[in-house]
């Protein structure tokens, strides 16, 4: 009887131990393929998302670089793409408005030419023979208008330069002359544009090109006062820059 009881006790203990062993085995399997596996799968998914985002980020940076011209070519140390600059002198705001539309259409930067001695309304009265513009028109020596600044920071990074001005007596308003004379346009595409109530571009662009002596100058365009942004954008798009 004692032997039978001992056998039963041993069998019971063995059964309990077997059950604990199976439970432990099951937990280990669950740990390998259950919650731990889910974490591993989640981490892999996050890594894939991160990788998929990298080409998008790189694309955006490349696009910004092409626009800004700020990232050098790794091979030759030169800019991969030049920037666009819109230089203008505006007497009454019309040229400034057109320049703003060009900058918006091209992603370019604006640079205003400001005479150190600003023109007043009386100065600009061409019907008054004693006005400043009339005196300057009659005497070329007085057309040398000193500007607050005639040079642009990081000038070499600009590939395309628009130059805008009003038409005075059939030519470009002379405050732009100082800027043309002060800069080297070698390697740049230069595009003149003007605003006027009735006069066309005339020879203004050709005369500025002759004065510059450098640069690849395009024909340019004349805009009427109050030109629409849509018309300016259509012209810019047609340049194929």
Image (cartoon, helix red, strand yellow):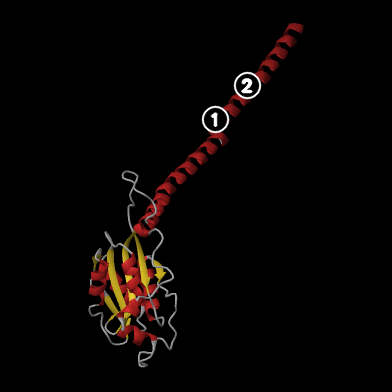
Q: Tell me whether the residue at label 2 lies in contact with that at label 1, contact meaning CB atoms closer than 8 angstroms.
A: no
Q: Which mark is residue 21?
A: 2
Q: Quadrant of residue 8?
A: top right
Give the number of the mark in front: 2 or 1: 1
Q: Dot 2: within a 10 Å radius of its alpha carbon, few (fewer than 14), some, or many (20 or more) residues?
A: few
**Residue name at image x 54 percent, y 38 percent:** 39
The vertical placement of 23 against 2, above or below, is below
Is residue 37 or residue 231 the one in the foreground? 231
| Mark 1 neighbour class, 10 Å CA radius: few under 14, some 14 to 19, many 20 or more | few
Q: Quadrant of the N terminus?
A: top right
Gap in angstroms between the C-alphas marked 2 and 1: 17 Å
Q: According to the image, label 1 marks what residue? A: 32
Q: Residue at x 42, y 68 (%)?
A: 149
Upstream in the sequence, badge 2 or badge 1?
2
Question: Circle 2 — which element?
Answer: helix
Q: Secondary structure at mark 1?
A: helix
* Residue 139: mark in rendering: none
Residue 85 visible, this orientation: yes
Residue 1 in view (yes/no): no
User: Closer to the camera, 235 or 182?
Assistant: 182
Residue 205 % position (x, y): 25, 74
Q: Position of residue 6 (x, y in %)?
A: 73, 10
**Residue 4: image x %, image y %?**
72, 9
Above or below, 45 relative to 22 = below
x then y, percent, for residue 78: 33, 49
> In the rendered image, which quarter contains the C terminus?
bottom left
Which image quadrant is residue 222 in? bottom left
């Amino acid at each position: 009887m004692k032997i039978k009881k001992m056998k039963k006790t041993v069998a019971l203990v063995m059964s309990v131990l077997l059950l604990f062993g199976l439970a432990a085995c099951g937990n280990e399997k669950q740990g390998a393929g259950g919650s731990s596996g889910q974490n591993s799968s989640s981490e892999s998914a996050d890594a894939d998302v991160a990788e998929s985002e990298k080409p998008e980020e790189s694309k955006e940076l490349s696009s910004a670089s092409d626009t800004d011209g700020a990232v050098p070519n790794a091979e030759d140390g030169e800019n991969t793409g030049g920037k666009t600059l819109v230089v203008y002198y505006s007497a009454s705001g019309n040229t400034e408005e057109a320049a703003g539309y060009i900058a918006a259409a091209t992603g370019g930067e604006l640079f205003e030419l400001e005479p150190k001695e600003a023109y007043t309304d009386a100065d600009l009265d061409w019907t008054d023979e004693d006005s400043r513009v009339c005196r300057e028109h009659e005497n070329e020596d007085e057309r040398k208008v000193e500007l607050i600044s005639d040079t642009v920071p990081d000038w070499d990074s600009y590939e395309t330069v628009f130059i805008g001005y009003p038409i005075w007596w059939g030519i470009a308003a002379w405050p732009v002359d100082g800027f043309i004379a002060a800069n080297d346009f070698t390697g740049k595409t230069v595009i003149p544009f003007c605003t006027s109530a009735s006069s066309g571009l005339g020879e203004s662009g050709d005369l500025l090109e002759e004065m510059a002596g450098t640069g690849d100058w395009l024909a340019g365009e004349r805009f009427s006062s109050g030109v629409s942004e849509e018309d300016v954008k259509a012209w810019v798009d047609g340049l194929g820059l």
